[in-house]
Amino acid sequence: MSKAKEVVVITGASAGVGRATARLFGERGACVGLIARSRRRLEAAKKEIEAAGGHSLAVVADVANAQEIETAAEQIENEFGPIDIWINNAMATVFAPFHEVTPEEFRRTTEVTYLGYVYGTMAALKRMKPRDRGVIVQVGSALAYRSIPLQSAYCGAKHAIVGFTDSLRSELMHDGSNVHITVVNLPALNTPQFEWSRTRLPRHPQPVPPIFQPEVAAEAIVWAAHQQRREIDVGSPTVLAKTIQKVAPGLADRYLAESGYDKQQTSQPVDANRPDNLLEPVEGDYEAHGSFDSRAHGHSVQFSMNRYRLRWGVLGGMLALGFIAWRKIGL
């Protein structure tokens, strides 16, 4: 098979943001390597990509296992050729107060959400750095800068990704490498994680409103993979969270202490038969969207402005110069 325009690898590709991103790359005709634990959903995602005009290879692997990720990378390159873009996206979380989280749960969340990014980046750099080209996208979160209660393990892992990535970015610059690494910080999204993440909350978990559809994240990730931005924030809530953390972190602490519990729960009690994907994949026909479609936004005005900031800056400059010229002529 002839090599398509791009070879892309996505972890956590069987559902949620990963699934939406894989589909969008498929529409661009890319060869997409899909990594996740559920064979059934990976095959469903593979069919979506091929129906959209792309090519795909489904590889069952646990991102918390470095050898499995290395083997997956090798399989994808054997199938499609050199990897152009690697997207670290897989995550896990536990909804519970810290004192109710077991050491095993904290470790597993950290292994998936943080070390999964480390192992994915290792596999990508092993191939990209000798070629002196390639892009690594770290799918980040507003919670990497402003933690919230009831998700201490997840927030800690997201913070760790920022520290690790900043260190690596400086090393690549020092080496004069043309491999680019970027972070895309996301807002609350309507994905299946709220249906299957482990929880000890009395009521059903939910994303903290306002909620966005996973396609908003996918658009930003695909765009970021073709830019040279250091970091991209998606959604005004992400920008607001980062800003408040810089200027008034104590105020944010108190606000979240009062509101952070209720905002992460619906009014519905947790189902006694609720599935749990922390240790094993949950089977079922989960796709990109979760159960909050009626409340989710399909567009981010903030990201559109961010995306076209240079264009708007040039336009604003031209208008300003035109106004000055007009005033001088008028005088």
Image (tube, rainbow, N blue to C red):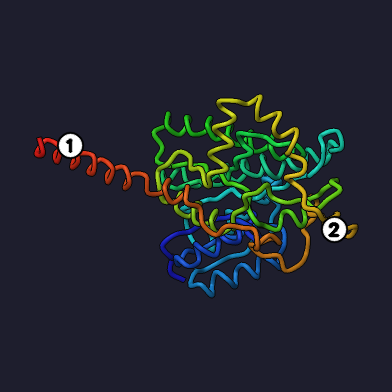
Residue most extreme to the right: 272
The dot on residue 141 is: none
Residue density around tag 2, few if under 14, some if 14–19, many if 20 or more, within 10 Å: few
Left or right: where does residue 245 sit relative to residue 231?
right
Q: Residues within 10 Å of mark 1 (few under 14, many from 20)?
A: few
Local secondary structure at mark 1: helix
Instruction: Identify the residue at horizontal 82%, vertical 37% (top origin).
Output: 97
Residue 233 picture location, percent across and down: 51, 43
Marks 2/1: CA distance? 64 Å
Location of residue 290 by image quarter: bottom right
Write down the residue under mark 1: 324
Image quadrant containing the C terminus: top left
Measured from the top left, where is residue 43 in percent x and y? 65, 69
Left or right relative to 223: residue 278: right
- Residue depicted at x 53% and y 30%: 167
- Tag of residue 274: 2
Which residue is farthest front?
331
| Residue 234 x, y percent position in the rendering | 52, 46
What kind of residue is marked 1?
Answer: Ile
Vertical position of residue 194 compared to residue 286: above or below: above
| Mark 2 vs 1, N-terminal side | 2
Who's the residue at 77% across and 44% down the image?
262
Q: Is 114 placed left or right of 96 in the picture?
A: left
Relative image position of residue 289 (x, y in whole percent): 65, 62
**What amino acid type should be assigned to the residue bearing mark 2?**
Arg
Q: Circle 2 — which element?
A: loop
Left or right of 135, for residue 119: right
53 is higher (above) or lower (below) than 176: below
The answer to the question of whether label 2 and label 1 lie on touching residues, with beta carbons closer than 8 A, is no
Q: Nearer the viewer, mark 2 or mark 1?
A: 1
Q: Quadrant of residue 309?
A: top left
In front: 153, or 90? Answer: 153
